[in-house]
Image: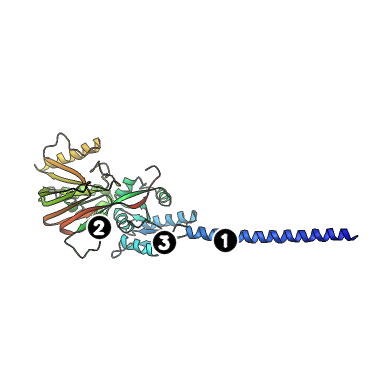
Amino acid sequence: MNTATVIILVSMVVLIAVIVVAIALIRIHMHRKRVQQLEQRRNDQVHYAFIVNPSKPSAAQTCTKIREFCRERGLGETMFIETQLDKDGRACTQEALERGADVVIAVGGDGTVRTVASALAGTGHAMGIVPIGTGNLFARNMGIPIDDVTAALTIAVSHGSHRVDVGRLQLLDRPDEDHGHAFLIIAGVGFDAVMIDDTDPNLKKNVSWLAYFVSGAKHLFAPKYHADVSITDGEGKPKTLRQLEFRTFMAGNCGQIPVFSLMPDASFNDGLLDFELIDTDGGLIGWANLFGDVVHQTITKKAEQSPLSAHSKIDQMQGRSAELVLDKPVLTQVDGDMLPETKHLKFTVDREALIVRVPLGE
């Protein structure tokens, strides 16, 4: 073997060795890069917190489905926090955010959704909803399926969302309270609050929202309420109405309830609340007229009374806030949750303060 051949062979061996080393170095570099990318992806993963109302009959079964759903889709960063008698959805959500949650998913009824929203409003964190309550009115208004856990979860972990107004009810004669009570659907004072407060919980479990009608029938002839009402309209102009007489005064963010439309003009993201003052006279005739008014506006989709109505009144107006000073303490409610009696209260709205995961196209 001559010298030239040796040189060529040695050169080839060296070249092969260089190629092998280069490939090894490239592989090491690519491996390190992949690890870095995976770590970055891990840091970018969404951390989900599920706030669960364990008192709901289907809560345990629903949580099992949620865990299976998360496992199948590789959603490893999850936490479950249950509400308790002394720890509502608001406190649970604050804990979840402190523990690093990015998206908080309410698993319960309107009460759980309301209290979770109360803590999330203004934070920039999105809220998902897995409805397992009896009414689920906010989920219905948002187009979220109420009888399909998998579909609701798919929506909750997607990126389709709406910015939603959050109503607040402040009890001004209770200075010890540190926040306004949030509502997403309807808050009210008077007959509606008394009706909700007196509803049989067992009957509600069996016949859902129809139980409210049974309770309401017991209070049709209760005394009316009187209040001075100051409303600030959408342009910021105040108007005060003295000694109004009414059966109930409500503020709505969403106006649709099962079957009926209470506030056809209500929009969940217009920065306004829809105020509705309801009154009747003439005994059962007045209540029958009122029912006809609700049916009329449900069909026409307009905030107006039936032309046949004679013994009922539905005055509807929009505004940024409304303040009531009553002549005696009365019960109030927010999305079906009872608050203490009050003589001085104020409704306000936080425009588009809440991000809610909804079906695409809703």
Q: Nearer the viewer, residue 341 or 37?
A: 37
Measure the C-alpha gap from mark 3 to mark 2: 26 Å
Q: Residues within 10 Å of mark 3 (few under 14, many from 20)?
A: some
Q: Nearer the viewer, residue 5 or 198?
A: 5
Residue 35, labelled with which disc? 1
Q: Is residue 221 visible?
A: no
Q: Residue at x 39, y 42 (%)?
A: 361
Q: Earlier in the sequence, mark 1 or mark 3?
A: 1
CB contact under 8 Å: marks 2 and 1 = no
Question: Horizontally, is 221 left or right of 73 in the view?
Answer: left
Residue 112, labelled with which disc? none
Residue closest to the far top: 307
Q: Earlier in the sequence, mark 2 or mark 1?
A: 1
Which secondary structure, mark 1?
Answer: helix
Q: Is residue 216 visible?
A: yes
Mark 3 highlights which residue? Answer: 79
Disc 1 marks which amino acid?
Answer: Val
The image quadrant where one finds the C terminus is top left
Q: Earlier in the sequence, mark 3 or mark 2?
A: 3
In this picture, is 174 found above or below 167? below
Mark 2 highlights which residue? Answer: 181
Q: Nearer the viewer, mark 2 or mark 1?
A: 1
Question: Horizontally, is 119 left or right of 238 in the view?
Answer: right
Which secondary structure, mark 2?
Answer: strand
Disc 2 marks which amino acid?
Answer: His
Q: Residue at x 22, y 63 (%)?
A: 177
Q: Residues within 10 Å of mark 2 (few under 14, many from 20)?
A: many
Which secondary structure, mark 3?
Answer: strand
